[in-house]
Image (cartoon, rainbow, N blue to C red):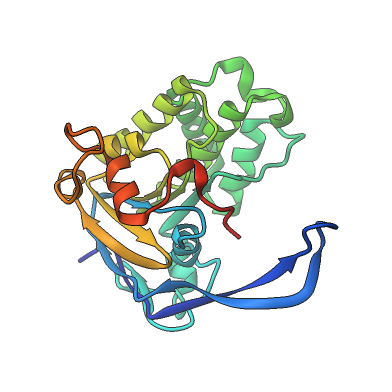
Amino acid sequence: MSVLALKLNKVRKLFYKRDDKSGKFSRRKREVVALDGVSLVVAPGEIFGVLGPNGSGKSTLIRLVSTLLIPDSGEIRVFGHDIVREEAVVKRMINRVSVDAAFFKKFSPLENLSYAARLYGLPMREARVRMRAILARLGLKEEAFTQPMEQLSRGMQQKVAVARGFLTSPILLLLDEPTTGLDPHSKRDVQAFVREIRDTHGATILLTTHDMEEADRLCDRIAVIDNGKIVALGTPAELKRLVKAETGGTPTLEDVFLALTGHRLEETEVEA
């Protein structure tokens, strides 16, 4: 049985127009199709990547799977459980790490993780041992465990977000741009941990990222999304065979991205 099976017709979103001069949102709104005819199946133990420009629909896809949004039509199943009709069951199987992870800023990493453990009903004695082990594996020093989150660097905070995501040992871990803004050392720490939890704990991972090198290094298969549609799906090697490199050498995933979406990474629009 697949871990994730997704078949969507159209998923619509409402956007409010921002006034260019005042910066305020007006009462006028427009409806756009965020995802259109998206189908995919993720196998157990797979690291499945989703690439696309900002506004392409990849973050909407993550929010749908995490039950934060309800699809207009179609269905999403996690281990055969429908995310709408069996939401409570699905929530116990998944966890999510986003680029804008929220914390109690005055609390320490251990306090934030303890709150998450209680929220999920984990035995606290076991959870305390586990959270320290995960934080240490991600490269946080012992003295940072008890410092307020607001005093930690962006990289340290994101490592705490990853630790919180894996604390519950989810069957399906949803990573929405988890290494965006991290320094190279912190990024490598997080990437190594992602591979480790897949290889040693059998977790299945759905990953969105703008980092083509990260996707190439981590992902077993990748779906490229543009304008709400999947324009290509395959292993990194299969995707590279679709295009020719601009330099004439071996194509990279960035070459694939540019060829399939027509967007340069630094020129993508802000996603609503």
Foreground: 107 or 154?
154
Residue with the most extreme bottom position: 73
Quadrant occupied by the N terminus: bottom left
53 lies above or below 13: above
Q: Position of residue 251 (x, y in %)?
A: 21, 38
Taking the image as shown, residue 38 lies to the left or right of residue 63, namely left
Q: Quadrant of residue 18?
A: bottom right
Quadrant occupied by the C terminus: bottom right
Taking the image as shown, residue 271 lies to the left or right of residue 257, namely right
Q: Position of residue 88 (x, y in %)?
A: 49, 70
Foreground: 1 or 54?
54
Q: Is residue 178 visible?
A: yes
- Identify the residue at image location x=44%, y=63%: 61
- Identify the residue at image location x=72%, y=28%: 148
Foreground: 207 or 122?
207
Q: Position of residue 262 (x, y in %)?
A: 38, 53
- Identify the residue at image location x=55%, y=39%: 161
Taking the image as shown, residue 272 lies to the left or right of residue 91, namely right
Taking the image as shown, residue 261 lies to the left or right of residue 62, namely left
Q: Is residue 204 visible?
A: no
Q: How many marks?
A: 0
Q: Position of residue 134 (x, y in %)?
A: 46, 30
168 lies above or below 143: below
Foreground: 237 or 118?
237
207 lies above or below 183: below
